[in-house]
Image (cartoon, grey):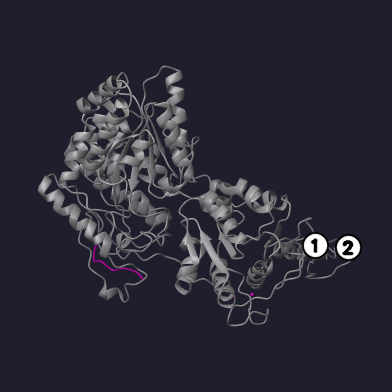
Amino acid sequence: MAPSGILCPSGIAAKQMSSRNSLAPKRLACSTSPTTSKRANTANVKQHSNRRRNVKTRANAGDEDDLTPPTRWVDGFEGRTNIKPPTPILDTVNFPIHMKNMNTKQLKQLATELRTDVIYNVCNTGGHLGSSLGVIELTVALHHVFNLPEDKIIWDVGHQSYPHKILTGRRDQMPTMRQTNGLTPFTKRSESEYDPFGAGHSSTSISAGLGMAVGRDIKQKRNNVIAVIGDGAITGGMAYEAMNHAGFMDSNIIVILNDNQQVSLPTQFNNMNQDPVGALSSTFARLQSNKPLRELRETAKAITKQLPGPLPDVASKVDEYARGMISGSGSTLFEELGLYYIGTIDGHNLDDLITILNEVKNTESVGPVLIHLVTEKGRGYAPAEQAQDKYHGVGKFDVATGKQMKGKPSAPTYTQVFADALVAEARADSRVLAIHAAMGGGTGLNHFEKFFPERVYDVGIAEQHAVTFAAGLATEGLNPFCTIYSTFLQRGFDQVVHDVALQKLPVRFAMDRAGLVGADGPTHAGAYDVAYLACLPNMIVMAPSDEAELVHMVATANAIDWCPSAFRYPRGSGIGLDLEAAGVGPDWKGTPLEIGVGRILQEGTDVALLGYGTGARYSMQAAGLLKEQGVSAT
C-alpha cells in the first residue's frame, strides 16, 4: 500500500486523489561613477527618485519596443555576449586591505568595475542580482573605511553579499556560486573569516551584532560591529526587539538601514513614496554624523541627567524632535528605541558614504547608531531597474537583453497550480482569505491578488505575526490560508503551537518549497515541517504526489473547519498530469478528500512501500527496480 497524502491528528495516512519579456537595450545599462558636484548629485537623485516612481515594469510594459530606453550605460560589455569586461582596478584587490590607500576617484572606478563583475558572474550562474547591485557603493565604502576581519560586518539575509564576497578573497570562486561544494548564496561562517555570522533568513543581524558588541566589551576590545539590514528585513519583529535591547545596553554598534523600497519581493504596500534624497538631506546627514556634534550631545546627556525634576526629559525631547525635524519622518522612532539616527543618505553617493562612515567610526561616544540609506535595488542595470521584482532572484541571463535563459516548463509549477486552485476556492467561498509574508511572487499570491485584491494580506517579513493574524481571522469564522515557505514557517513555530494548534483554530498552512531546494542551500531547505507539524495535537497534514492531489488538498483544507491543517508541496514543475482525467475541471475547483484513508497505487505480494507526497513517485520507481529483482511490491 502506498498512501501519498494526508495524515490525520493521530498520524495515520489518508486518502488522496490524483491534477494541472525581456528588455532590449543595445548595450548593458548601468550607472557610471557617482557625480562629485553637489548640484549635479541633487539633480541626479531627483531624476533617480522620479524614475523609481514611474518606471514601467516587466509585468505591465507590454511590447518591449514600447519600453522606455535605459538612461545610463555600463562600460565593459559590448554587443549581446556575456564576455567578462576588463576590471583593471578590481584585479588589484584580493582583500579589503588592498583598498585602504585608494583615493576617491579610484574607489568610484572600483565600484563601477565591481558592479560589472557582479553582473557578469550572476549572468553565468544565476542568483540574487538586484539586492547585490543596490549595495555596491555601500560595500566599497564599508571595506575601505573599516578594518576587516577585525571589524565585523553582518549582512542581514546575506543575499546582497555577492560584492562582499568578491572583495574578500572569493572572487575566483564566484563561478561556483549555488553549486555543489561551491560558494553559498548567503554568508557562511565556515566559508570565510570575513563572514562573522551565517544568514539566509531575515531580521537576525542586529541581534547577532549586539551579541558581538557586548562580547567585545566584555573582552575589552575596540573593534567595530556593523549590521546591514534592509527595509524588508526590518519589518520583522526580531529587529525591533534587538534595537530595543541595543538601546538599553548602550553598546557601540552601527546599524545601517538599506532602504530600497523593496520588501524582499514587491508587495502590495510598495507604493514607491520615498521622498527624494537631495543636497539638503545630504548636508544634514553630514552634520549629524559630525564628531563634535555627537560628542557634545553625549556631554549634554550627562549634564541633563544631573538636572532636577522633569528637565532631563524636556531636554532630551527637544533634542529628539529637533533632529526629527532635520532628518524627516522616522528618526524619532529609532530615537525612542535608543539609537542615534543619521539620515536619510543617498546610498549611491560614495563621497558621502565614506565621510559619514569615517565620522561615525572615529567619534568617541557611547551607544548604538542607525544610518539610514536610500538605495535602488538593481541599480545600474536597466533590465533589473525596470523589472517589477528588480531581478531579485534570476537564472542565467543574457547581459545585453536581460532575457533569462529558462527552459520552457513541461508542466505548470506547483506554485501555479496552488494559486489557481485557491482562486477557484475563493470564487466559490467568500470566506477564503490569503496571507503571505512579503513573498507574493514566490507563493503565487500575486496571481490570486489579481482576482481578489481585497482578500490578500501581505504582512511583511513577519511570519510570527502572519500566523497569529490568521488565527485571529479564524476566530471570526473566516477561512485564512497562511501561505509561507516551509523554511520560513519555522520562524513562526511557537505561534503555530500556542495560537493555532492548541486552540484548534482552522488556519490552513500552505507550505511552498517543501523538501530540498538545491541551489539556495541548507538555510532554505524545507526539510523539517513534516516532523514539526505532524507531532502537534489537532493538526492535519497533507502532501500531494502530483498536481491533481494538490488541487484537491486546497479544497480539502478549505473544507476542514474544525482544526488546523497544512499541506506541503515542492518547488518546480509538476509531473505533467492530465488534470481533466484526474478529476480537475477547467475551473480548477478541487474535491475534498476523505481524511485518514490512503490510496493503493499498485498491488504486490512480497513487500509494501509507503510513500508520502512526492515520495510516492519514488516508491513507484523503487517498486520497478524491485520487480527487476523478482520482488513484488505493493
Q: Secondary structure at mark 1?
A: helix
Point out residue 9 in the picture as x, y percentages from the top left corner. 76, 57
Say above or below: 33 vs 99. Answer: below
Say above or below: 406 vs 83. Answer: below
Q: Residues within 10 Å of mark 1 (few under 14, many from 20)?
A: some
Residue linked to disc 2: 606
Instruction: Give the residues drawn in magenta, as a range.
Output: 19-27
Residue linked to disc 1: 626
Q: Quadrant of the C terminus?
A: bottom right
Q: Earlier in the sequence, mark 2 or mark 1?
A: 2
Is residue 100 visible in the rendered structure shown here? no
- On screen, residue 73 versus residue 512, left or right, reads left
- On screen, residue 467 versus residue 261, left or right, reads right
Please state which of residues 562 and 463 is positioned toward the viewer in this rendering. 562
- On screen, residue 278 versus residue 360, left or right, reads left
Q: Are marks 2 and 1 in contact (CB under 8 Å)?
A: yes
Residue type beneath disc 1: Leu
